[in-house]
Image (cartoon, coloured by chain):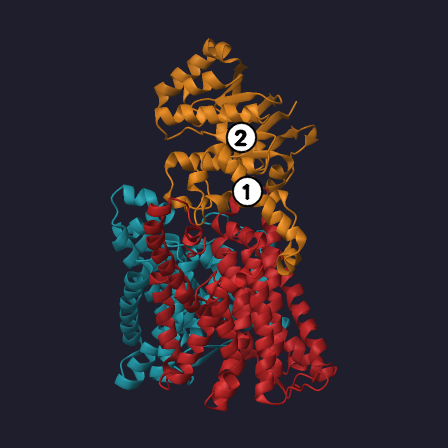
Chain colours: A red, B cyan, C orange
Amino acid sequence: MFVFLKKPKFWAYLVLLAVAIVFPFISPNRYYLTVVTLSFIYAIAVYGLNLIVGYLGQLSLAQAGFFGLGAYVSGLLSLKLHMSFWLTMPLAAVATTVVALMVGLISFRTRGHYFVILTLCIGVIIHLVIEKWDDLTGGVRGLIGIPRPTSIGPIDFISLESQYYLVLAFLMLTIFVMSRIASSLVGRTFKSIRNSEELAATLGINVMNNKLLAFGIAAFFTGIAGALFAGYIRFIGPDICNPNLTFEFLLFLLIGGQATIAGPLVGTLVANGLTESLQFMQEYRMVVFGILLILIVRFFPGGLAGETRILITKLENRFNKRKKSRTNAPSKGESHATKDQGFN
Amino acid sequence: MNLLIQQTVNGLTLGSIYCLVALGLTLIYGIMEVPNFAHGHFYMIGGYVTFFMMTLYGINYWVSALISGLVLAVCGILLERLVFNPMRHTPHSNQFIAAVGAMLFLEASARVLWGSDFRSIPAIYDKVLVFGGVRLTEQRLIIIAGAVVLMVVLYIFLKHTMIGSTIEAMAQNRDGASLVGIDVNRVAMLTFAVASILASAAASLAGPIFLVYPAMGSLIIMKAFVIIVIGGMGSIPGAVLGSFILGMTESLGATYISSSYKDVIAFAILVLILSLKPSGLFAKGAR
Amino acid sequence: MLLKTKALTKNFGGLTALNKVDFEIEEGEIVAIIGPNGAGKSTFFNLISGYYPSCSGNISFMGKDMTRTPTHKFACMGIGRTFQTTNLFTDSTVLDNLIIGYRSKTKMGMFDAIFNTSRARRDEGASREKAEEVLDFIGLTAAKWQPVGNISQEAAKRLAIGLALVAEPRLLLLDEPAAGVNHGETSELAGLIKKIQQTGITVCLIEHKMQMVMNLAHRIMVLNYGSKIAEGTPKEISNNERVIAAYLGGRANA
C-alpha cells in the first residue's frame, strides 16, 4: 500500500518541501526572501520552457513574450477593470495559452533553424507591440500600482511571507503537473518527438497535435508565472518580454538540466542565488552567464540535474552489475540508464 | 514627391547597412550551417573600435574603419575556433544556444568596458546636399556607395580568386568540398573573418548617423535573420535583395504607415512568409 | 485486396522516381519488391506508408482511399513500416521504444496524465503488456532495459520490426530488413518474418538478398527506373528475361 514511504526519493522531496516551508523563518533577512520568491516565479516559467525545449526538443524562444503577455493581461485586467487577482490570473493563463496555440500553429510547420528564428521573432513582436501600444500598456513607462493578489477569506497576501507561500503553492502545483506529465505516456510521446519526429509520425503519433499540446501547457504555466510576477512586483515594464529574459530562462534551464523535473528549479535558484550572493556578479552577470551558456552546451549538456543523474546511473550500474553476478536478474535500476541530453 | 524620394534614399541607406550585415550572416550560414547569433554584436564592436580609434587616437575615419575591420576579423576567427568549430557535430539547437551565449557575453562586455551610453562616430562628411528640394547628407551617400563597393569587392573575391571560389564551392556542397581536398578549417576561418569585416564595415559606415551603443547589435541581427530567411538561408543574391526590400519597406512604412511600429514590419513579414511557406521562400538550405 | 495502388507516381524536381505503378497486395501473403539500386523501391514504400505524398495516382487500403491521408494516420489504419537505415528512438531503452510504438492505440491525454485517471493506468498497463508481448515475440526480452545504443545491429533490426509490430498492423512494410547482417542472422530474420506472417499479418518487403526473397515471398514485383517491369511468383521472376536484363544492365552500369 504505502510503497512510496520506502522510496528515498519520496523522503528527499519531503525534506525539500519542509525546508521550503520553514524558509521564511530561517531566512536571515527579508531580501533573501524576495530573491527566492522571485526565483520561484521565474522557475514556473522555466518549467514551461523545459517542457518545450527539454521534453519536446523544440528550441522555442518566445518564452519571455508569453511571460510578459501573462503579466500584462493580468495587470491590465486588474488595473483597468478592477478584477480580482483570482480572476485575472486564470484569464492571463488562458489568454497566453490561446496566443501560444496560434503561434504554435504557424511555427510548428517550420523546422530547425527556421523554427528558432520564427519563435524568436514572435517574441520580439510581442515585446515591440507591448512597448509601442502606449494607450493600452503605458509604453516604456509600463504599468504602475498593480493591486496585490486579493485575499481569500481570512488569508491576505500583504506580507512578504504570505506572498512567498502563495508563489510556493503555485510552484508546487507546476512541479506536480509537470512530473505527472513527464512520467506518463504523454511525456514519453513528447520525448519520442524530440528523438525523431519522422519515426513518431510513422508510428501513428500525431506530431502536430502533440507539439501544440506541449506548447499550450507550457504557455499556460508561463502565463501563471507572468500573472504572479505582476501581482508580486506590482510594476511591470516592457522589459519583461525582452528576448534577453528568454535567454536567461534558457540559461536557468541549462544550468539545472533540461528534460529533468528538478532542473528548472535548481537552475533558477542556483543562477539567481549566485548573482545575488556575489556582489561583483551584478555588473559582470551576463559576461559570466554568456560564457557559462557556451561551456554548458559544450561540456555539460545535461546540466546539474542531468549530469548528477548520469553519475548516479553509472554508480548504480556498477553496483547492479556486482549484484547481478550474484542474483542474475535484470534490475530496474538500469531503466534510468538513458541519457537525457541534446535536443534532437 | 520629395518625401518619397527622401524616404527612398533613406531606405537605400538602411538597406545598405542591412546588406553588409546580412551578407556575412548568410555566408557563415551557407558554409557552416550555423546561425551566428553573435554576428550583430560584431557589428556593434566594429562600431566601437572605429569610434575609439577616431576619438582616442585621432586616427582618420577610413584608417579607423580599416583597423576595425582587422580587429573584427581576428574576433571572427576566434569565435569560429573557440565556439563553433568544436561544436560542429552537435545538434543545431546547441549551436544556437552557444551563439546566444557568445552574444550575451559580447553585449555585457561592451557594457562593462564602455558603459551603456549612446555614442556617435564623429561625422566628417556632414554637409547637406540639396538636389531639387531633396536634402541628403553626404554620409548617407557614402553609406550607399560604400556598400556597393564592398559588394563588388566581395563578388570579385568570390568569383575570381582561388580562395573565394573555394568558399563558394563549399557553400554549395560541404561534403563534396572536403572530398576534393579543400581545407574545411581554413575556409571556415576565412568565412568568419570576411563576414566579420563586412559587419564592422557596416558599423563604421553607419556610426556617424545611427548611434553606437552596446545593444545596437540585437535588433539588427534579428533583422538580418529575417532578411536571410526571406532571401533563402545561405543565398548571397537573396541576402542582397532581401536587405533592400526590408530597408525600403521599413523606410516607406515608417512614413506612410506608422513610425512607432516600423521595427515590427520586419518581423511581421517573416511571420507572414513562414506561415505561407514554412520552408522559406527558397527551400534550398532548409533543414 | 488489402492494398492497391493505381498509377502511383512520384517526381522529385524533374526526376521521376516512381512512374505509374499499379500494384496489389493480398491479405495474408508475403510479397517482395526487388530491383536495382535507385529503381524506386524505397520511394514506393514511402508512398504507401504515407511518408511522402504522391504526385499522382492513388492508394487504397482495405477499400479506403488513402491518397491524401497524413503520415500518422497510416499507422492508425494498420500500416506499419521499418526504414532502410534502422530508425529507433536512440535516447531510450528497448522497452520504452516499444511502449511508444503502442501509443497510437492508447487514448490517454493530458488530463489523464495529470490526474492519473483509471484510463491513464489502463493505457500505461496495456502499453507495457503489449511491449512485453512483442519483446517476447522478437526475442529481445533479455535486452529490455538496455539503452538502444548498446544493442547489436541485428537486435536493432529486430527491434525496428518490433516497433512496427506493437501497433498491431495489418500490413507490415519492411525496407531491407536483412541489410548489413551476416548469413546466419539473415536466416533468423527470415524466420521472424515467416512467424509474423503466420500470425495473420501481411508482409511486404524490399530486399537485395535474393536467396531470402526467393524463399520467403509468395509474389515478387520488380521495379526498374521507377516502373514496374515484372510481377509474379519467385519462379516466374527468376526466369523473366526483362528482369534478368535489368539486373545485368544495372550491374553493367554500376
Q: CA distance from mark 1 to mark 2?
A: 15 Å
Q: Secondary structure at mark 2?
A: strand
> Please, what is the three-letter code of the amino acid marked with disc 2?
Leu
Residue shown at the point (57%, 73%) measured from the top left? A171
Residue C13, position as x, y percentages in the image: 51, 37
Q: From the viewer's perspective, is residue C17 above or below residue A221?
A: above
Closer mark to the observer between disc 1 and disc 2 = 1
Residue holding disc 1: C101
Residue A81, position as x, y percentages in the image: 75, 82
Residue shown at the point (59%, 28%) measured from the top left? C8
Q: Are marks 1 and 2 in contact (CB under 8 Å)?
A: no
Quarter occupied by residue B139: bottom left
- In which quadrant of the rendered image does the N terminus of chain A lie? bottom right
Decide: few, some or many residues near mark 1? Use Cα within 10 Å; few <14, some 14-19, many ≥20: many
Residue shown at the point (41%, 59%) measured from the top left? B94
> Please, what is the three-letter code of the amino acid marked with disc 1?
Gly
Instruction: Please say whether residue B132 is visible from this viewpoint.
Output: no
Q: Nearer the viewer, residue A296 or C27?
A: C27
